[in-house]
Image (tube, helix red, strand yellow):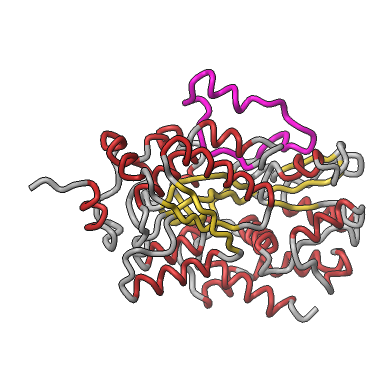
Amino acid sequence: MIITRRALLKLTAFAPFIAGSAKAADWSVLTAEAKGQEVFFNAWAGADNINAYIAWAGEQVKTRYGVTLNHVKITDTAEVVKRVRDEVKVGKKDGSVDLVWINGENFHAMKTEKLLFGPFAETLPNFALVDTKGKPTTQHDFTEATEGLESPWGMAQFTFFGDGAKISAPPKSMIELAAFAKANPGRVTYPAPPDFHGTTFLKQVLIEVTPDRSVFAKPIDAAAFAELAKPCLAFLDEIRPVLWREGKQYPKSQSEVTQMVADGELLIGLTFNPNEPANLVAAGTLPKSTIAWQHAGGTIGNTHFVAIPSNAKAKAGAQVVANFLLSAEAQARKNDLKIWGDPTVLDVTKLSAEDAKLFTAAPAPGSVSIPGPAILEPHASFVALIESTWLSHFGNG
């Protein structure tokens, strides 16, 4: 009996770990299947430049593959996870989500609950261009192995920035940051969790004060975390009196910290996009003397991905979109500071000479001059414990 591609997709709709996604040899079959499909891409919509980039990608896949990409603009990916969960629970096979921008706890939840289609990512033709050796987070999401259930889209790494005219020697570790804060009282702070950047700052402290980093690769319970967190809390207690407003108040968001750096109220800002400081310089928000840096021993890095729910209606179309997002053209456009400034997941040495030229723009003011190593995110189980511990220790001012 011959099983058609369409029949195979239907058979695998609720069997996310059964082989059923496209192999390179089947790509022409899959693209034919995708033609005419509508892909509902649920993606964060909090930035105009990102929305514009997704719109451009939609125009490209429509012209090239006959796939209509609908950007479903969301503010919280957890709500998408809940929607898919509810749809699968009631047996809805033609789900409302075909592709989702995802990573971290949300991926962990969907993988654990078997809400994802695949494996598909590593069978995409353009996955061969991904830098899986130099960027191990392209196959590990917050220490969770992706197992082909999500396709890498962009890179991120915790980065600090400030005005080089005011900072002669940027602190390259948390110990140096503490010394800098003591020498410049009231000019350093971090956002209050659960702001993502505030939580990441706490993760960075926790990692740097913990001798055995292997603990971060495994789930942790509340009792074990309480013991592990003691040196981190001691460090935070030490710097609290010299923070902005003596640590009695914390900014609510990373954007608030950035604005205070731009206004001269703070000396150091933080971001998870290494290109953001250069973007802010180009926009005139920060001075051309802005510098950006990462800690010499490394800072937390991760990859953000796209994934296909197990009950997606347009699985073929979703894979075509994911593959296009991995193309040199799409990655270079996303990497462009004038477009988005999101670092690429590709290994540029794998590209043709012509495609490699797309990534050779001269470093812009505000760029990271000497990148630090990327440190894997702690296991997803750490997040809630980090935030609740900080809130109980510092939340009351």
In the rendered image of this protein, does residue 184 appear above or below residue 80?
Answer: above
The front one of 385 and 9 is 9
Q: Is residue 142 visible to the viewer in this orientation of the structure?
A: no
Q: Main secondary structure of the magenta part?
A: loop
Identify the residue at image location x=36%, y=58%.
Answer: 313
Which residue is situated farthest in the top direction here?
A: 353
Q: Residue 116, located in which quarter of the rendered image?
A: bottom left
Q: Position of residue 255 (x, y in %)?
A: 77, 58
In the rendered image of this protein, does residue 357 appear above or below residue 34?
Answer: above
Q: Position of residue 176 (x, y in %)?
A: 78, 50
Q: Is residue 331 magenta?
A: no
Q: Is residue 314 visible to the viewer in this orientation of the structure?
A: yes
Q: Which residues are magenta?
A: 342-371
Identify the residue at image location x=39%, y=60%.
Answer: 309
Q: Residue 35, located in which quarter of the rendered image?
A: top left
Q: Is residue 350 magenta?
A: yes
Identify the residue at image location x=81%, y=40%.
Answer: 281
The front one of 38 and 383 is 38
On the rendered structure, is 387 left or right of 149?
right
The front one of 247 and 354 is 354
On the rendered structure, is 131 left or right of 37?
right
Image quarter hosting the C terminus: bottom right
Q: Position of residue 69 (x, y in %)?
A: 49, 49
Identify the residue at image location x=85%, y=64%.
Answer: 243
Q: Position of residue 383 (x, y in %)?
A: 57, 67
Please tell me how many numbered marks the rendered image carries. 0
Which residue is situated farthest in the left direction here?
A: 1
